[in-house]
Amino acid sequence: MGAAVGEGASVERLFAGTDPTLELARATDWAATPLGPVAAWPPELCAAIRTVLPSRIPMLLWWGPELVQIYNESYSRVLGAKHPAAMGQRAAECWAEVWDELGPMATGVLDGGGATFSEELLPFMERHGYREETYWTFSYSPVEDAEGRVAGIFVATTDTTARVLTERRLRTVRELGTVSAAQAREDGEPVAEACRAAVEALGREPLDVPFALAYQAERRRAEALAELDAAKTRFFQNVSHEFRTPLTLLLGPLATLLDDPDLPTGQRVPLAAAHRAALRLRRLVDTLLDAARADAMRLRADPEPTDLASLTADLASMFRAAAERAGLRLEVDAPPLPGPVLVDREMWAKIVLNLLSNALKFTAEGTVAVRLRALDGAVELAVADTGAGIPEDELPRVFERFHQVAGTRGRSREGTGIGLSLVADLARALGGEVRAASTPGEGSTFTVRLPCGGRDLAEPCPLGDEHETATPFVAEALSWTADEEANPAEPAEDAPRVLLIEDNPDMRAYLVRLLAEQGWRVDAAVDGDAALELARRARPDLVLSDVMLPGRDGVAVLRELRADAGLARLPIVLLTARAGSDAAVEGLEHGADDYVVKPFEPAELVARVRVHLETARLRELMISNSERRADTLSGALDTRSLVGQAMGIVMAQRRCGPDEAFDLLSRMSQRRNVKLRDLARDLVQRISGAAATRRVHGTAAPAARQAPPPPPPAAGAGAP
């Protein structure tokens, strides 16, 4: 027995071979396992190993009371993520999740119960990091030692999971194929009956379909929504193209006129405003067209080798004048990159321009910084600002189409909510991504990361018409800080005062000029807070306000004015770009006197303002006259009371009637050249003062015995 044990029992000879599992077996510290060193293994174990390892069928050997595992290369694929830790591991540890089921079978074999055979057994294993439905056909066969005792178990196994699942799912598909609406009950609706039968067929196999619901109306709704979405996309594409022709006819002649050095200044100012408005409209049209292309999955990049650092720095520098005019620092840090980057330059330009204009719009003071870096095979653009910031709950939605963060203060309330979503679409079309980080009150950072592309690129192409792409963005940014125009002429001192609230500089300058030409004094404010301060400092005769304002909007300003007792009667006219009766009703319900929709006819707006100014003037005049009449009546009643008291005193002193007393008082008033009311007040006060003095000194006699005061002097005898 002892000689047989040591014969050939070495790791190198027992596990000889080149496959990975044999290499693993050779490297295993068997002495640390319950089996002990290989040199001490019994010949029955060595013989079983020589049977298991060469086989191309998955085979496993469990040896000893603790069932230590030894397996071949084919079985390693059965183990999944349990390999390579399973080599030399106890079976109960390796198969812990299914040992309640497999353990009793293995114990029965060790106890002499004989071999077992299981066909398509279902254990739920965890071999790949999740609980998995598996099916196995396997046998446990005893391996005896020299004394006939069971020393180990030989496991031969076949994975039947794929076959079982395939047969079961094909059976379900066949049953679904037999479902027909024609088989519906006479009292049933064909489609509903077909759905019911399909759900019943799916319910027979809960492991494949644990939950099923049938929707026929949702499918039709989804199809209708898809058709509507496609129609919307076609509409945006068509209308964007249609806008380009009239815009060309607007921009061309306007540019020609503005290039004329002999154009009078009085005409240049409104033409320049019209040119800026047309440029902004062109940018909106281009943005809508890009958004429509993105929705239709037609946003295609045309990449070419590009000096991305130079392009980025060039685009950013175009905003320097707008930043300086706004009192901001523009920092551009775009050092040369290791080489050209394969990118669609127009798409990249729109990304940079949108992010920069957005940063300038929402940064009241501080810095806007542009940084470009090459990092780990990619290029990264960061546009950071010290502006208003974005609330944490709004960050996940900033790249949604048409979403705008409510309550954020900026240089303008205008916007479509497309810019940032278009940045995300363009970044994806370039194979990259964009992310946002922000702290409310401290600023935001938008980061775009793109792959660099191949290293062996051709020389970068010269820069093209990126300036043309940038012109509308820069023009709009400059308009946010445009200088206000002076009134055409100094209005008269008693001219009506109009408080104008409009955040768009061009529209504000136009309205100031239009109203001032009527001889009215115009105070202009860019937001609601500034307007309320102006109104309380110098009460206007009328308020003309845009509805969409940064911060406090026009309706909120209206409510504040109506709540102020000193300003509650001001006529208020609202301006809005929202057309339709619903919008007008909403404005009037909040207390507006009138509601004017943009675009408006200048003459109509002037006429409406004039009507409300005149109506307010007449209303205030009527209120003033009413107050004067009330004051006059009050004075008359007061005078009558004083004269009556004075007549009573004279009647008591002179023992005369009312006519004689009144006649006496009238003659005294004429002789002393004082009003009758003043004479009566003086007489009443003197008599009242004398009575008060007697009461203080205790000299008042009883009323029945009190002597009458001395009578007034006779006519011509002097003042009483």
Image (tube, rainbow, N blue to C red):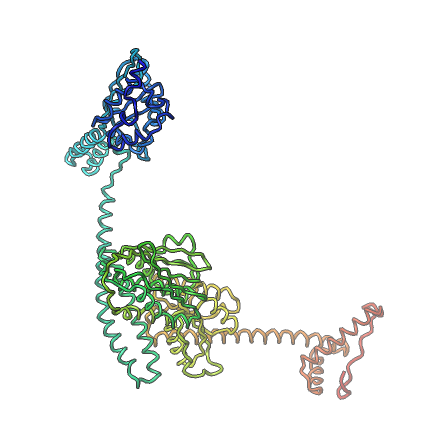
Q: Is residue 519 visible to the viewer in this orientation of the structure?
A: yes
45 in relation to 505, above or below: above
- Where residue 280 appears, x then y in whole percent? 31, 69
- Where residue 391 appears, x then y in whole percent? 43, 55
454 in relation to 147, above or below: below
Nearest to the observer: residue 182 or residue 154? 154
Q: Work out which residue is located at the far bottom of the displayed protein and give it.
A: 716
Instruction: Locate residue 344 relative to residue 532 in the image: left or right.
Output: left
615 in relation to 176, above or below: below
Q: Quadrant of residue 12?
A: top left
- Where residue 514 appears, x then y in whole percent? 38, 78
- Where residue 195 appears, x then y in whole percent? 21, 36
Nearest to the observer: residue 694 or residue 246? 246
The quadrant of the image that shows the C terminus is bottom right
Residue at the image position 27 percent from the left and 21 percent from the top: 8
The quadrant of the image that shows the N terminus is top left
Nearest to the observer: residue 395 or residue 709? 395
Nearest to the observer: residue 411 or residue 98? 98
Q: Is residue 553 visible to the viewer in this orientation of the structure?
A: no
